[in-house]
Image: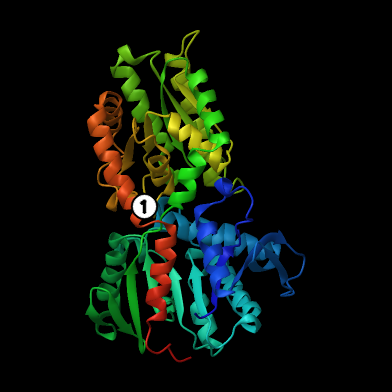
Amino acid sequence: MSRLIIISNRVSPATGEGGGNQGGLAVALSTALRESNGIWFGWSGEETENFTGAINFQRSDGVATATIDLEAQDIDEYYNGFANQTLWPLFHYRIDLAEFERGFAGGYERVNARFADTVSPLLEQDDLIWVHDYHLMPLGRELRRREFVNRMGFFLHIPWPPMRLLISLPSHRELVDSLFSYDVLGFQTRDSLEAFMDYVTGQLGDEAIVHDDSTVSYLGRRVRLLACPIGVDCESFREASHSEPARRMQERMRISANGRTMIIGVDRLDYSKGLAERFLGYERLLSSRADLHGQIFLLQIAPPSRGEVQSYQEIRASLDNLSGRINGEFSDAEWVPLRYVNRGYPRDQLAGMYRAARVGLVTPLRDGMNLVAKEYVVAQDEADPGVLILSRFAGAAEQLTDALLVNPHSPEEVADAIAQALVMPLAERQRRWRAMFEVIGKQDVMWWWREFTRVLEEVDEPAAG
């Protein structure tokens, strides 16, 4: 087996302690690295006054990591700027929030070149190189320029936008050109893969040769396209949902509910998650169903993120106002309909919360996948499972067709789905749960990394530099 080199913006290997609290992606990639004696390379998250390329090597639970510090300008232009103020909103269909600054684009190119320079001495001839996500799209091109001919794959964790949106990016052609330095391009969904292919046929013209719906040649390179949905660590999360911390949390939520039915949402505080729209849908339900007053409550967990970015400050202020308005209008002395919490919880405690909730409300406006939807299903009691309400615009909707699928922009549709979930018969809840659990179990996070690396290893001849 070839050694696997994983390169991502941040490095978060599993520690081997408290498995229920480890992120599924970290668990899977750490397993892959242990099996191949590989390395996980990325930014430490720390700032340095002057970039030196110094690498901090660590080994934890058999996983080797190599991290670098970045300068303040790098962080501002590459991470806060181009990655999170240009690409993130654009790829999530929010062109109105995207900021197109030349300095951002310059910083993005500079940091990708710095990643390439720094990781180069660590690479060996037969290594498989797997680059992750929108922060590092040009990295494959930078490595090819340094004459690396290794098999290289790239996986995009967020959606790929339609061509008409992508061409608003001044450097859209250069960005797409850089992706053809890889041998395999992975997407979460068939929809994203097809959107990429639409760009290829619509913008690259006769320069690109489309061999079939998953293979295209361009710039002298033949690239395999792969729809490979990421999963959760199904077995370990199922175990976490039966752990003592999960049971304690489930009991605490039962006592706290005081006989009321709990609805749960768990999302990073981000405009792509549709939290304002979710609150409006819940408000619509409360407005139209007075009989539910005092009988239900929504627990929304939304830990803050990227607080230094203006649009994130605005969404937090908006949600504070909206939650206050809803509670002010509908609360009474004994009941608060919306519990809005700006903090995170360990995964085993979340599993207990999921298990206590009759309804899981996962309604992003656009999401590459959304693993909360899968975690909610995995955590359920198979004898008395809850109901998943899922946005049609989450990548998970391609797999979890037995969820109640909704348009998150429609308050009426969200309200109707909640009402339907609250009265759904046990037999139907069990049928829907079994179908979703089977899909999640077959295509878990271990399947995901093995499938991607299998396809990458099958590449006949790595591209020349």
User: In the image, what residue occupies the spot 44% across and 78% down?
Assistant: 178
Q: Residue furthest top?
A: 333
Q: Is residue 277 shown to the viewer in this render? A: no
The kind of residue tagged 1 is Gly
Residue 328: where, in percent of width, then height? Answer: 48, 16
Q: Is residue 259 above or below residue 355?
A: above
Which colour style is shown?
Answer: rainbow
- On screen, 387 above or below 106? above
Quadrant housing residue 357: top left
Label 1 SS = helix
Q: Is residue 90 above or below residue 312?
A: below
**Residue 150 at least partly seen:** yes
For label 1, the crowd category at 10 Å Cα-Cα, with few meaning under 14, some 14 to 19 and many 20 or more, is some
Question: Where residue 49 sits: x, y (%)?
Answer: 77, 65
What residue do we see at 58% from left, 57% from top? 80
Residues 82 and 436: in front is 436
* 332 relative to 197 in the view: left or right: right
Of residues 80 and 146, which is closer to you in this image? 146
Quadrant of the rendered image containing residue 459: bottom left
Q: Quadrant of residue 11?
A: bottom right
Residue 22 lies, in percent from the top left, at 57, 50
The foreground one among 94 and 336 is 336
Give 243 or 169, whichever is nearer the viewer: 243
Q: Position of residue 57 (x, y in %)?
A: 71, 70
How many circles with numbers are drawn on the protein? 1
In the rendered image, the vertical position of residue 345 relative to residue 209, given as above or below: above
The residue that disc 1 covers is 441
The residue at 23%/33% (across/down) is 428
